[in-house]
Image: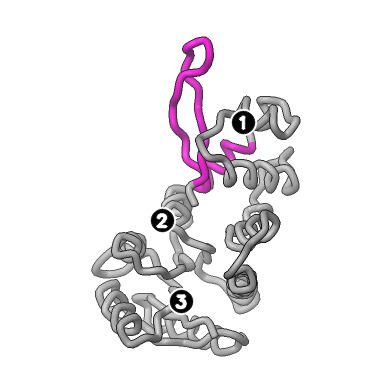
Amino acid sequence: MIRVLVVDDEPVAAAAHAAYLARLEGFELVGICLTAREAHSQILAARNGGMPVDLLLLDITLPDASGLDLARALRAAKIDIDFIAVTAVRQTEALQAAFGVGAVQYLIKPFGFAVFREKLEHYRRYRSRLESAAHSATQQDVDELFAARRPNVTAQLPKGLSSVTLDAVSAHIRRAEAPLSATEVALKLALSRVTARRYLEHLADLGMVSRTQRYGAPGRPEVAYSWRG
């Protein structure tokens, strides 16, 4: 069972999310918290009690702190926990920030049960693949794990981009030992530099890869991309 903590400052919304969760197989509700401080305390208590929380349904806007600040604090404390960002905030910056601190999915309020079920089942498939590859993983296992964990962005593809090529570019960047330029990605995947750059910039806009500046062969600056993980 995947143990889930609902963190939302709106009691009605929190109760609705808990009710949705009860309709899904493979998930167990640990509790409902209305503040970041309460959530942090309950996560620590569950961890110390030997029954850690696996997943947070985490509202980004909380009365005492940002949900993203809570996620950062948990990561800094080396507490292994996934979270799905749940919020009414629709700005791209918020989406990028959530992905940047490790969100596995993003739910925009208001949403119905069908959307909720899709996101949670997507996460459950990721957990299932992770457990099956726990002892020894092939490259294919690793690629499938990353694909299962990654939020579904294919529906958001700009015109002219394909999900197949996006997956290829994503997998290549994930496996790279150092940041890669659009030219390097293009050569490896038999794409034009302009095409490779479009896919890389799309991933960067979603917060899934980061951009850094470096100097190319003639000494001119170029953008290099690395997986944020």
Look at label 1 and name its amino acid.
Arg
Decide if residue 145 is on the left or right side of residue 51: right
List x then y, in percent, for residue 193: 66, 25
Queried whether the magenta region covers residue 119, the answer comes back as: no
Would you name the residue on which mark 1 appears?
197
Indicate which disc residue 54 carries: 3
Pointer 2 local density, CA inside 10 Å: few below 14, some 14–19, many at least 20 = some
Name the residue type under label 2.
Answer: Val
Mark 3 crowd level (few <14, some 14–19, many ≥20, 10 Å Cα): many
- Residue 3 to residue 172: above or below: below
Answer with left or right where residue 144 lies relative to residue 20: right
* Relative depth, front residue between 199 and 75: 75
The N terminus appears in which quarter of the rendering? bottom right
1 or 3: tag closer to the N-terminus = 3
Q: Residue at x 48, y 85 (%)?
A: 18
Q: Amino acid at mark 3?
A: Asp
Q: Which residues are magenta?
A: 199-227
Mark 2 and mark 3: span between their CA atoms?
16 Å
Q: Residue furthest front?
A: 136
SS under mark 2: loop
